[in-house]
Image (spheres, grey):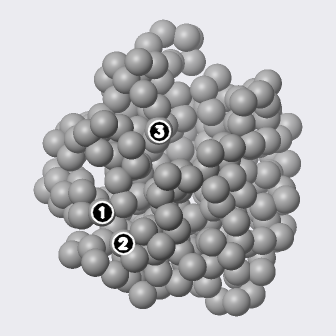
Amino acid sequence: MSDAMLIVAALNGMRSRLECPKLPISADELATEAKRAVDAGAGVIHVHVRRKDGLPAFDLVIDDVVAAIRGKVDVPISISTQRTRATSLGTVTALFDVLRAPPDLATVGVRPPEPDQPAHREEARQILEACERAGVRPQPVVIGVDSLGDFETLYNDSLLSKAPYIVAELGPSDGHGSGRMAGTPHNVLRLADACNATFPRFDVVMSGEDEASPIAQAVAAAAGHHVRCGFQDSSTLPDGGEAASNAELVEIAARLAHAVGRHPMEPDDVRALLR
């Protein structure tokens, strides 16, 4: 087991402010939340860049968000490339050719996590090629064991050579309303083991949706894997209360690491992991 545990703070995802009133969306809000999360122990900041109306932004708004966060913290920044059907694939891939200050990392999926969020291996291939041109490291996102075959093909085509880890996303514990595997303790270990068996050199960053978020973190931390937390995954605390900030969720993950004899990964170690 690695003593150091990477905590990825996923600040917003595609939640609405109706379900999460403290949700950060603007560049300034995301930068402020990023600073709090890093101070609490986060080693990577992950964001879904969105316009003022809350819809995904695949334009130079990303430059503004990345610059604002980098002005507050010195940790790797990750963005999502998950589009909705209202955004063309070409819009996403062209983005990496025009950004002035690209993020450090970008998540890439091969299976649709929700019905209105398209994802496919050949779509992922084009996004990975765009990331390669821009010098952005990919983060493969698996939402089930069946995702791994597609990523194995992309890996064999040398498109994942710069990926530092795999992000494993589980759905709610009841499995309803999501294309992801149900977020049960058994599935945490099953998916992590499958990732390790297919890609022995990759670490696994485990996450769960809503009430499965603390389950995924607890099992993954005890098993020696890394974790993701934040408003993207859950807007509530393990006891059901409303979280006041992403930092509060990161603090819980950091305490969890210490409880199993580990500690949050330091920024220098995170940079080394990316190299």
- Which quadrant of the figure contains the C terminus? bottom left
Image: 91 above or below 83: below
Please provide percent x and percent y for residue 86: 49, 52
Q: Nearer the viewer, mark 1 or mark 3?
A: 1
Quarter assignment of residue 172: top right
Sooner in the amino-acid sequence: mark 1 or mark 2: 1
Disc number for residue 95: 2
Sooner in the amino-acid sequence: mark 3 or mark 2: 3
- Which quadrant of the figure contains the N terminus? bottom right
Categorize mark 1 by other alpha carbons within 10 Å: few (<14), some (14-19), many (20+).
Answer: some
Question: Gap between marks 3 and 2, in whole Å?
Answer: 20 Å
Q: Looking at the image, which is closer to me, 98 or 248? A: 98
Three-letter amino acid code at disc 2? Leu
Element on which disc 3 rests: loop
Disc number for residue 24: none
Please provide percent x and percent y for residue 183: 75, 34
Element on which disc 2 rests: helix
The residue indicated by pointer 1 is 59
Categorize mark 2 by other alpha carbons within 10 Å: few (<14), some (14-19), many (20+).
Answer: some
The residue indicated by pointer 3 is 14
Quarter assignment of residue 61: bottom left
The reply to whether callout 1 and callout 2 are in contact (CB within 8 Å) is: yes
